[in-house]
Image (tube, coloured by chain):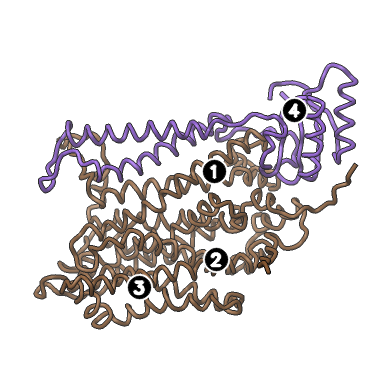
Chain colours: A brown, B purple
Amino acid sequence: MFYESPIRDPYIIGKKSYHQISNEILEPIDRKHNRWWYFILYLSIIAMSIGGYSLYKTFTVGIGSWGLNNSVSWGWDIINFVWWIGIGHAGTAFSIFLLVLRQKWRTSINRSAEAMTIFAVVCAGLYPMVHMGRIWLCFYIFPYPNTRGPLWLNFNSPLFWDVVAISTYVLASATFWYLGMLPDFALIKERVKSKVSKFIYGTLSLGWNASSRNWNRFEAISYILGGLAAALVISVHSIVSMDFATSVIPGWHTTIFPPFFVVGAIFSGFSMVLTLVIIMRKAYHLQDYITTSHIDAITRVLIFISLIMGTAYLTELFMSWYSGNGFEIFTFYKNRATGDYSIAFWLMILFNAILPQLFWSKRMRSNLTLVFIISLCVNVGMWLERFIIVVTSLSKDYLPSNWATYTPSYIEVGIFVGTLGFFVFGLCLFLRFLPVIAVAEVKSVNNRTTEIQEH
Amino acid sequence: MNSKKFILGIFKEEDLMIKAIKKIREKEIKIEEVFMPYPVHGIEDIAGLHKTRLMGAAVLFGIFGTALVFYFLYWVTVESYPLIYGGKPLYTLPSHVVITFVLMINITSGLSVISFFIANKFYPGKKADLIHPGVVDDTFVVAINKPEAEDEVQIIMNIFSTNGATEVTEKFVK
């Protein structure tokens, strides 16, 4: 008569002792890595070099070296900026939302998700600086008492809100990530043999002694930073959306943008975490910690978010028609759904709103190859979404005589390749030198390994 | 912990440690500290240990940060160098809310982290004085000030031994 919910799968598979958990998770730090790790590291360095050269050309030649023009004044720079920021919300979503919601299954994934956040947000933060043109004057955007008046900034502008929000987000995320690793650094320091490693990890652990006072304050600061950063997730991407929503461009000036962007950011973040976690659990034999139940839970969340994205797309289409505004109707129906960029538009719909619906099937969710492919599709789909938003609206806005097409120059592509290289480089170093799973937190959700003798 | 001699009960399981702590508390013996490889929720209440006031401090930092940023934005937009944007009023509270909110988070998290470091006496290069090398790995340690009376010492050691402690020892901590 009553529905009996199935027993939850264990957070960790197998009866493992705490020492065994430490050994299995920290094993990559203890050993030399294989050729694959070095190969990917060198590839990422090559990609960063391409990015470095592209940045050099941008700074010396100027923004004219990009494919931008008077009409399409924002191109791959802003598309990639928003894409990276979206991915950067993964760590906060996994780590902090799930912490606040008391979801213990976060413990296997939060550390790598937070690492991903840091590298993604650093990649994102490059773009607002670089797209200014005269980056050596970047200090103009910081509010400090100066001799130019003192000339302050426009505090009403979302472009400045971006500066503050993203700086705060980087700081808060990096702090949360680092403080979470204090107990693990203390553990690694006890394990490593070389004096240099002991010194480095000991310095990083700041004198952690595992007392209840340390832990009590640790949990308090986790909840404080977590609560603050959770609010930041909503506000940062709402602020980024305001870069568009506070304009008058058709297709941009719509009130759905703040929640639409926030949900899209969490969507792309979750899918990137899925991509990385599937590779990581296979490469580092962490299947007992990042179980198929974890993958199952993430794919279920992806279904839900994909439905919201689909609803948002339909809402935009409906409201543009319902408004009767000729420019809005043109933008959505003539410029996006049909027209020059229709392939990108329909691919976006397919990848973001339709493909993830396959995860309603348990068989599909259990097929890790399919899950991996769909997560890659979602990553591409979210990039296409930002492309559709930025380029289509700008290329054909109010005045037909100003209509122009946009093609990225090899410099812009090179900068993007460079950011991808930096992201992978950072992840390689993270996987090599830092604890990829939160060891202490995972132990707290472990099953008991010894029987208690009752007296 | 001040410099003194401690009796240490060393456990390999959280449940066994908690059982022992409850038995110790029944005898109204004060527990100086508990060391754990992961946080055990509620241990401060069970063992009668110090609870942090960091959460309350964070609220105060937030109020301070909000007030500071609101005043800063007022001073900048109205007194220091007023600029007119599109005929809008100088003090635009709705758009200031965004900056205030984000900077409040910045200030609160910064001050909270500094307080965390000061409270724990953390600094780069500090030598971690681990009461037992296993406390960061797989060992739970309950530390009690060694009493003067020998029979009290025996009671404590007996409670530890009969409640699953793998080792009961004495240690001088500086």
Q: Is residue A101 above or below residue A220?
A: below
Determine which residue is flagged by label 4: B31
Task: Let me know if residue A314 appears in the view.
Answer: yes
Closer to us: A202 or B17: B17
Q: Is residue A314 above or below residue A218?
A: below
Q: Residue furthest front?
A: A1
Amino acid carrying mark 4 in the image = Ile
Q: Are marks 4 and 3 in contact (CB under 8 Å)?
A: no
Q: Quadrant of the N terminus of chain A?
A: bottom right
Determine which residue is flagged by label 2: A298
User: Chain under label 1?
Assistant: A
Closer to us: B77 or A263: A263
User: Chain under label 4?
Assistant: B
Residues indicated by labels 2 and 1 sit on the same polypeptide chain: yes
Mark linked to residue A70: none
Quarter of image, res B1: top right
Amino acid carrying mark 3 in the image = Leu
Determine which residue is flagged by label 3: A384
Closer to us: A251 or A215: A251
Q: Is residue A279 left or right of residue A7?
A: left
- For marks 4 and 2, give the CA distance: 42 Å
Amino acid carrying mark 2 in the image = Ile
Determine which residue is flagged by label 1: A222
Query: Which residue is at 34% across, 68% downward?
Result: A414
